[in-house]
Amino acid sequence: MSIAQDPGSHIAMIQTGNLRELVRRALEAALVAGELRPGEIYSAPGLAERFGVSATPVREAMLDLVKDGFVEVVRNKGFRVVAMSELDLDRISDIRLMLEVPSTVRAAALLTPGMTASLTRLADEIEQAASGGDLIRYLDADRRFHVELIALLDNPTLTDLVDRFRRQTRLFGLDALVKSGRLVTSAREHHTLLATLRSGDAEATTRLISAHIGHVRGVWAGREEDHPQA
């Protein structure tokens, strides 16, 4: 499966494979890049024409994004990209601190050599995608890295929640990193995180994840001086 992408756009031509998932990934990249703007209404047929597919997989992918709170249905018109207030962003940050910090510390104790090798490969892929400016691949690899880590706790509900809030983080913060040229630096920090997890130092892991979530909130607020996120 593949996505043929216009170098100047993240609205891509879907070629083969699982259309629903491919369209969703391309839509997320377009949201990150600001090509789909908060408050704007987009129709499934209109987006389908831009993707070069039928309206059905686009509508299905948009409904997936509705469930995650990224867009909302506008009756008889299409889908509106949801705008988030500062209070919304503060609340997401608070939830992420409560969920991710203790979960990541617990997951570190369950790392096996096989899982460490898998996460190392994903960290390499994240860095390669960032270096090549491949936003869709970056988003996909980053998601898999963190989902696989939290999945060690064998709690699907927790994994789904962490995954959902991490995607919201990326959708609202990644564009600032791309524009500032810090995406590659951010990508490299996945190796730093993995090394910290392997060290077994719970306090260092707690500090790293807590700082990461704080940095993300700074990017959301447009505070470019904040350190890059992991």
Image: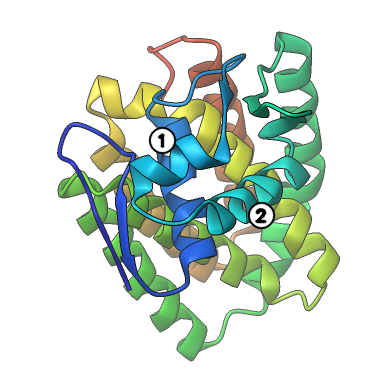
x then y, percent, for residue 32? 44, 32
x then y, percent, for residue 197? 53, 64
Using the rendered image of the protein, determine whether residue 47 is visible from the camera's viewpoint. yes
Badges 1 and 2: C-beta atoms under 8 Å apart? Answer: no
Q: Spot the residue most to the bottom.
A: 114
Give the vertical position of 56 relative to 50 (above or below): below
Q: Residue type at mark 1? A: Ala
Give the vertical position of 128 relative to 112 (above or below): above
Q: Residue type at mark 2? A: Asp
Q: Which SS class for mark 2? A: helix
Numbered disc in front, either 1 or 2: 1
Instruction: Specify which label sits upstream in the sequence, 1 or 2.
Output: 1
Q: Residue at x 24, y 49 (%)?
A: 134
In the displayed structure image, the side of residue 64 where residue 193 appears, left or right: left
Q: Please give the label number shown on residue 30.
A: 1
In the displayed structure image, the side of residue 191 where residue 164 appears, left or right: right
Q: Please give the label number shown on residue 137.
A: none
Q: Which SS class for mark 1? A: helix
Looking at the rendering, in which quadrant would you find the C terminus? top left
x then y, percent, for residue 86? 70, 10
Looking at the rendering, in which quadrant would you find the N terminus? bottom left
Using the rendered image of the protein, determine whether residue 212 is visible from the camera's viewpoint. no
Q: Please give the label number shown on residue 163.
A: 2
Neighbour tally class for label 1: few under 14, some 14-19, many 20 plus, Cα within 10 Å: many
x then y, percent, for residue 165? 69, 43
